[in-house]
Image: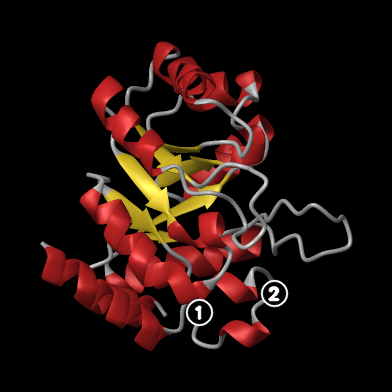
């Protein structure tokens, strides 16, 4: 996967060491060994690594391996963690919680910025609504508002918002048209055997097809 991503010009790879799950019995991640693997892959292909940090006690370990810290949707309003990463000299990706308003999302970003770290990247990952045909509802209007109201980069997560790979291409095109600065998309060489989120992951050919369509738009 690293080779395929690098070939398409991808510079930032998401290598998850810890995977917060709704059920405590589902796969939770490999921990530090996963960070070591991700670092090796990134160094081999000239890429950068981001990974989700779960607690401020993990900061020293994460600083050894990652280039960009990731605060996930479940921790979006964890003010103690937000203040802690605000004191770190690395960019921070902040993901919108599924039930968070845009105002709450931006206040969370403000915790990081006001603590001394201006390098925050926002991710829209869909919000929880009554709709059941997608995992969440992608808030494209929210992307436009975030671009209007802030100076921060905004990325659209088309994997977790949809929860299904068959609509990845149109969502990617919509995200591009909305003015988003980037995409977060899960790619796996063989999605059916993935340890988590298999239904939303793209195969490498599907990823390349999606990228071709985005390039055509540009």
- Inspect this view and state whether residue 119 appears: no
Question: Which residue is labeled 1 in the image?
Answer: 188
Q: Position of residue 118 (x, y in %)?
A: 32, 22
Circle 1 crowding by C-alpha within 10 Å: few under 14, some 14–19, many from 20: some
Q: Residue at x 40, y 34 (%)?
A: 142
- Residue 82 rendering spot, x and y as whole percentages: 55, 24
Please tell me whether mark 1 sits on a helix, a strand or a loop: loop
State the residue at coordinates (23%, 79%): 7
In the rendered image, the quadrant that contains the C terminus is bottom left
Q: Nearer the viewer, residue 161 or 112?
A: 161
Q: Is residue 66 above or below residue 144?
A: below
Percent position of residue 111, x then y: 49, 16
The quadrant of the rendering that contains the N terminus is: bottom left
Residue under label 2: 195
Mark found first going from the N terminus, 2 or 1: 1
Classify 134 as above or below 190: above
- Name which quarter of the figure residue 74 lies in: top right
Provide residue 67's location: percent of width, then percent of height. 39, 48
Considering the numbered disc 2 on the image, is that residue within a helix, a strand or a loop? loop
Label count reads 2
Q: Residue at x 68, y 69 (%)?
A: 196
């Amino acid at each position: 996967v690293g080779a395929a991503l690098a070939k398409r010009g991808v510079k930032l790879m998401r290598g998850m060491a810890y995977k917060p799950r709704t059920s405590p019995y589902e796969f939770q991640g490999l921990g530090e060994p996963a960070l070591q693997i991700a670092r090796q892959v990134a160094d081999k292909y000239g890429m950068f690594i981001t990974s989700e940090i779960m607690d401020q006690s993990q900061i020293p370990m994460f600083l050894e391996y990652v280039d960009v810290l990731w605060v996930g949707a479940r921790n979006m309003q964890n003010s103690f963690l937000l203040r802690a990463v605000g004191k770190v000299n690395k960019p921070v990706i902040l993901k919108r919680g599924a039930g968070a308003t845009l105002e709450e999302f931006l206040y969370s970003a403000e915790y990081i910025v006001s603590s001394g770290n201006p390098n925050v990247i926002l991710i829209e990952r869909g919000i929880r609504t009554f709709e059941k045909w997608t995992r969440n509802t992608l808030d494209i209007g929210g992307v436009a508002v975030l671009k209007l109201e802030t100076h921060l980069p905004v990325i659209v997560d088309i994997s977790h918002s949809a929860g299904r790979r068959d609509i990845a291409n149109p969502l990617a095109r919509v995200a591009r048209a909305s003015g988003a600065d980037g995409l977060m998309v899960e790619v796996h060489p063989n999605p059916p055997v993935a340890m988590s989120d298999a239904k939303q992951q793209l195969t490498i050919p599907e990823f390349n097809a999606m990228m071709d369509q985005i390039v055509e738009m540009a």
